[in-house]
Image (cartoon, rainbow, N blue to C red):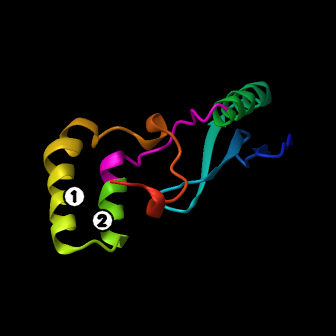
Amino acid sequence: MATTKNGHIELLPSGSYRVRVYLGIDPVTGKERRIKRTVRTQAKAAQELANLLRAAEAENAPDDSATLGLALERYLEVTDLGVSTRATSETYIRRIIGPVLGDVKLRKIGRIVSMRSMPI
């Protein structure tokens, strides 16, 4: 079946076609991100592969559930802050940042290269 650098199409035993596209490494979890779709015809599979590759190139890939709130929680788990700095940061996150931006998907904000480099 068709294969590109970041995606491919495979024929399933059922006669349907599975399209898989590699989206890169998730900056929050560090895991590989892949998306797959199953369609009935080879023509639809080729069309779906093209659509998913375009979305991946534009960094608009569907499938991200990481939010700013989750990133800030993980940041607080791994960072080494003094007692008063931690308390202040947690208060800002809980009272100001979380209610307004906590549910915003990270992909809408932009790429975070490293959780340790993210300032609070």
Q: Nearer the viewer, mark 2 or mark 1?
A: 1
Residue underneath mark 1: 89
User: Residue shown at 32%/53% (left/top)?
Assistant: 120
Question: Which amino acid is tagged 1?
Answer: Ser
Classify mark 1: helix, strand or loop. Answer: helix
Question: Is there CB contact under 8 Å for labels 2 and 1?
Answer: yes
Residue 99 point in image, percent of width and height: 18, 40
User: Residue shown at 34%/38% (left/top)?
Assistant: 104
- Relative to 3, is 64 on the left or the right? left
Vertical position of residue 17 compared to residue 115: above or below = above
Magenta range? 58-70
Mark 2 Cα-neighbour bin, 10 Å: few <14, some 14–19, many ≥20? some
Q: Quadrant of residue 75?
A: bottom left
Vertical position of residue 109 compared to residue 22: above or below = above
Residue underneath mark 2: 76
Between the C-alphas of marks 2 and 1, the distance is 9 Å
Residue 49 point in image, percent of width and height: 73, 33
Q: Earlier in the sequence, mark 2 or mark 1?
A: 2
